[in-house]
Image (cartoon, helix red, strand yellow):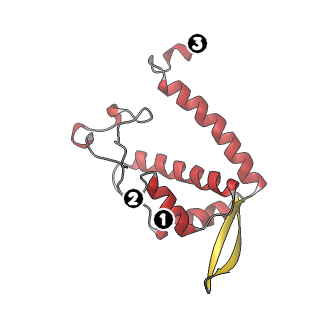
């Protein structure tokens, strides 16, 4: 199911009037650069989350992310996985499945710690931007 671009996170104010009715089930590489950057960060968190729960592989994550409205090509996803691995957040292991080599990724200790830190920061941010007063009451 597609979700509208207007949401508690982005609100309608971020989008120009012509785009308000669109859905974000668009290619991650199209459109507003700021929104694209947000989504890429969300996708990385999504990858870490699933890799912390158990081994993941690229095609399965493309399908999983598609269920959440993200349309990614292997050319977008695999560099993300490789980058997370190179930065020490994921580790990989090759396994042969049905005669083909598949690379499985799992979260490292560093990846699990980063996910825990991101959860805390995301909760705090969502709490703040979800307030009716726009978070103004939290300022000194």
Whether tag 1 and tag 3 are in contact, CB under 8 A, the answer is no
Point 35% across, 56% down: residue: 30
- 80 relative position to 53: left or right: left
Name the front one of labels 1 and 3.
Answer: 1
- Mark 2–mark 3 distance (CA, rounded to whole Å): 39 Å
Location of the C terminus (image quadrant): top right
Residue 90 image-quadrant placement: bottom right
Say which of 31 and 107 sits in front.
Answer: 107
Give the residue number, with chain letter if any, for mark 3: 140
Give the residue number, with chain letter if any, for mark 2: 29
Whether tag 2 and tag 3 are in contact, CB under 8 A, the answer is no
- 109 relative position to 52: left or right: right
Point 39% across, 49% down: residue: 33
Give the residue number, with chain letter if any, for mark 1: 76
Q: Position of residue 16 (x, y in %)?
A: 26, 38
Q: Secondary structure at mark 2?
A: loop
- 45 relative position to 4: left or right: right
Residue 78 visible? The answer is no
How packed mark 2 is, by other alpha carbons closer than 10 Å (few <14, some 14-19, many 20 or more), is: some
Q: Position of residue 125 (x, y in %)?
A: 56, 31
Q: Position of residue 137 (x, y in %)?
A: 52, 13
């Amino acid at each position: 199911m597609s979700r509208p671009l207007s949401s508690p996170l982005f609100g309608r104010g971020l989008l120009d009037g012509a785009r308000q009715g669109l859905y974000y089930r668009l290619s991650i590489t199209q459109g507003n650069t700021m929104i694209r950057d947000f989504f890429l960060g969300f996708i990385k968190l999504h990858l870490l989350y699933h890799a912390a729960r158990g081994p993941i592989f690229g095609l399965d994550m493309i399908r999983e992310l598609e269920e959440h409205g993200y349309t990614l090509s292997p050319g977008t996803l695999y560099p993300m996985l490789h980058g997370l691995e190179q930065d020490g957040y994921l580790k990989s292991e090759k396994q042969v499945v049905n005669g083909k080599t598949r690379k499985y990724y799992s979260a490292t200790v560093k990846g699990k710690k980063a996910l825990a830190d991101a959860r805390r920061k995301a909760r705090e941010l969502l709490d703040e931007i979800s307030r009716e007063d726009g978070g103004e009451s939290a300022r000194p």
